[in-house]
Amino acid sequence: MLICATVLSVIACKEDKIELFSGTDVLYFKWSVDGFNNDLSNRIDSVYVSFASKTPDVMDSIYNIPVKILGNLTDFDREFKVQVLPTSTAVEGVDFVMPNNVFVPAQSVTAMLPITLLRTQAIQNEVVSIKVGLVPNEHFRTDYYGTAERNEKHELLKYNEIEVVVSDILNKPFWWDRIIKFYLGDYSRKKLTLFATVNNIPIPNWETAPPSIGTFFGQKNVFKAYLLEQKNNGTPVLEDDGTEMKLGPYA
Amino acid sequence: MIKNIKVQLFFLFACFIFMNSCNKDEGNYDYVEINEVVFEGLLEDYTVSRFDNLVISTDEVKYTKDTDGTGNYEYSWEAVSDNFLDDNIYVISTEKDMNQQMLLKPGVYTLFYLVKDLNTDVEFQYQTKLNVVNSIYQGWMVLNDVDGEPRLDMISLLDGEYKEVYNVLAGSSLTLTGKPGFVECYPYQPSFYGVYVSTSGNGTTKLEPDTFDWGKTNNISYEFVSSQPEDLEVTTLYPRGNYFSVVMANSGFYVYNRVNNVYYSTPQNVRADGISFEVSPHISTSESFGVFKMVFYDNTNKKFVYHNNYTSNCFDVTSTAPVFTPGKDLKYMVWNSYGGMFGTTFAILKDPSDGKNYIGMFESNSFTQSHYSEIKATNFDQAEHIAIDPTYAYIMYNIGSKVYEYDVFTGTTVEMLDKGGLEITKLEYRKFFKSANAELAKQLIVCTYDASGTKGSNGIMELYNVPAIQGQLELNTSFSGFGKIVSVAYRER
C-alpha cells in the first residue's frame, strides 16, 4: 500500500502544457459584457446622458465609453477604429466630437473611447442619438456576438455598437405646481436654472421628491434677494418673453 | 482483505505512539533565575478626571535581583478601551512613574504597566483598571488670549463644585489659531448641543458637546443654506432659544429658526424692497419668548427696526414713543428679564445734536416704552464696557479699573469696585435657558487681567452678587489661572 502511494505521488505531478490562445484579438464594448460599472445585472448597449441638471455655464461634457479586448496583451499600443453609424441622429462636429486616434495601450486589456458631448440649443427640445460601431482593423476583430439579452427585452445585446442618447430637456418638475409655484411663481426653464446658479447648486430634482423645506426657504431667499438686487440696480431679470421674472405670493 | 490491512496498520501506528508518549524528557538545561519585576504598591483601579494629571508612583515596585532598581529598563503605560470605543492602544507615558495629563475620552480602560529588563529582554506587565471621568459636563467656557494665541478653558461643575480645567482642546483634533473671537453655547439641534468657538484662524465652529472632538463639518458655514467660505468667521452669535439664533457676519445678520424652517441664508438687514442698511452689532432678542420680535438698529437711517423671526427682511417700528424718535446713535442694546415675564429691552442712545446719552426701556413685541431718561452717570462717555442688571435695571460700566453702578430711576452713580492695576476685560451678565441657573443670571461677571503676571495664568473671572438700593457688590465666586479673558459662555445641561 505504501509503495503504491509513493509511486502514485511521483507520477501525479507531471506537467501538462496548455496551448495559449492564438488568432486575431477581439474588441468589444465593455458595458454589454461586464455590465455598467461592472454590474452584471445591468448589461447595456445604450446610455442616456442629460445636461438638464447642469448649470448653464456647462457647455460640454466628455463621456468615456470603455472598450475591452479578448486576447493577448501586447507591449505596444494598438490602434482601434470606430465609425459613426448612419442611423445616428446626432451630427459629428455639431452635437459631439470624437478623437481621430484611439488605441488600446500596451499591457492593457481596456481602453476608453472619449466622446465630447456638446450642449446645443437644439437638445433643449429634442434628444439626439449618437450611434458608434467598432470597425475591424489589423489588430482587432469586432465580430463578437453573444446570447445575452437587453434588460427585460427579448433583443440581443450588441457587443460592437453603442448608442448614446443626449438630451437637455428640462420640463416643469412634478412638485412645481404642488409646492414650488407658491414661492417661485410660474415655471420657466430660465427661472429654475437661475435659481440653481445664484445658489451655486446643481439644478434641483423636484421631479421625484419635493424639496427639503428649510433648505428650500433659504435658497428661495437667496434667489429673491438676487432678483431684488438686480431690479434695484436697474437691470431686472427678464423671462424669455421679455416680462419681468416674478416670484410667487408666499415668497 | 483491505479492511484487515487497514486495521493492522492502525494498530501498528498506535503502538508507535504509545511507545513514544511516555518517554521521560531528561533535558539538558541549566535553570538560571533571572531578574523579575514584582509589582507592589499599585492599585487595582484608578480614577482620573479627563484633563487632570494621572499620577501613579511606582516606588514600591521591586526587582528580585536588582534590589536597588538601578538596572536598565524600558517602561510603558498603555491603555485600551473596555467600552469598545475603538481598538487603539494608547501609549500614555514611557516614564517610570506616571504623571501625565489625561486626554483619553471618558470611559473605562484597562491600563498596562509594562517593564522590560533590557539586560534579558524579558518584559513584565501589570494590569489595572482606569476610569476616565468626564470633566466637561457643565460649566463656564472661557476663551482667553494667551500671548496672542487663543486658548479654551472651562470652569467645570463636578460633584457640585466648580473647578478650573485649562486647555480643554488638548487632545482634540481642533487646534485654535489666530485671534480669539468668542465662545457661545446653545442648543443648536435636539441632537446636537452647540458649544461654539470662534477665532480668526479657525473661523466659527462647534465642538462635539461631550468630548470636544471636532470635524470640519462642525463649522458654522455648514449651517448656512447659502454658499459661504468653509471657515466662515461670524463676529457674534446670539442664542435666541432652542434651535434659534442670530449671527453677525459680512456686516449683516442672519437668522436660524428651526421651528419655522428658517436657516441662515441671506443677510436680513434689508427692507422689504431689497434695500440694505448698516446694522448695529447690538441686538435685543428675548430668549424666553420665541414669538417676540427681534430688535435691531439701522445705523444708516438711525432708527429701530425689527425682524419677525421668519420673513427674510426687517420692518420699521411704528411706535412714536420718545425712545423711537430717529436720529440718535445706538451705543448699547440688550434684552434681559427685568420687569416681569416679558422682560425688557434696554437701549442706550446718544443724541449727536447735543451729545447727551439716553436710556430707553421698552417691551419688544408691542414696542411699549416703559422708561426714557437722560443718563447722568459720572463720566459715562468714557465707559468701556456696559452691562445692565436684570434685577434692578442698574447700568454697570467701567472706566479703567473702576466699576460704577448707575440707577436709572434716581440718577445716582456709585463706585462699586476698584481693581487697581488690573485691566477689566469683560463686564457682563449672561442669559440662561435653564431655570436651575437663574441665580447665575443675576450675577455680574467681571474679568480682569494682570499685565505684569505670568502669561496664561494672569486672568481672573469673578462673579458678584448685586444688592438692592445700590449696596456694594459682594464677591460670590472667583476663578483664576486664565489668560486674558476674551469671552465667556455657560454650557448648560
Image: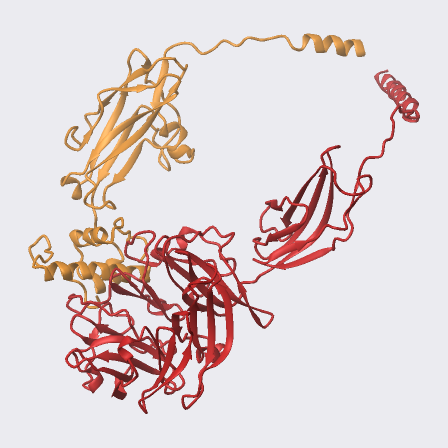
* Label total for image: 0
Q: The C terminus of chain A lies in which quarter of the figure? A: bottom left
Q: The N terminus of chain A lies in which quarter of the figure? A: top right
Query: Which of A82/B42 is in front?
Result: B42
Quadrant position of residue B487? bottom left
Query: Which of B321/B310 is in front?
Result: B321
- Tell whether B273 sits left or right of A154: left
Seen at 51% across and 60% down, the residue is B166
Q: Is residue A159 above or below residue B201?
A: above
Q: Is residue B305 visible?
A: no
| Colour convention | by chain
Q: Is residue B391 above or below residue A230?
A: below
Seen at 41% across and 85% down, the residue is B391
The chain letter corresponding to red is B
Query: Which of A128/B265 is in front?
Result: B265
Quadrant position of residue B302? bottom left
Q: Is residue B158 above or below residue A151?
A: below
Q: Is residue A25 visible?
A: yes
Q: Colour of chain A?
A: orange
- Tell whether B106 sits left or right of A184: right
- Tell whether B360 sits left or right of B430: left
Residue B471: % across, % down: 43, 88
Residue B372: % across, % down: 25, 87
Residue B320: % across, % down: 18, 86
- Tell whether A186 sits left or right of B236: left
Seen at 47% across and 73% down, the residue is B462
Residue A193: % across, % down: 20, 51
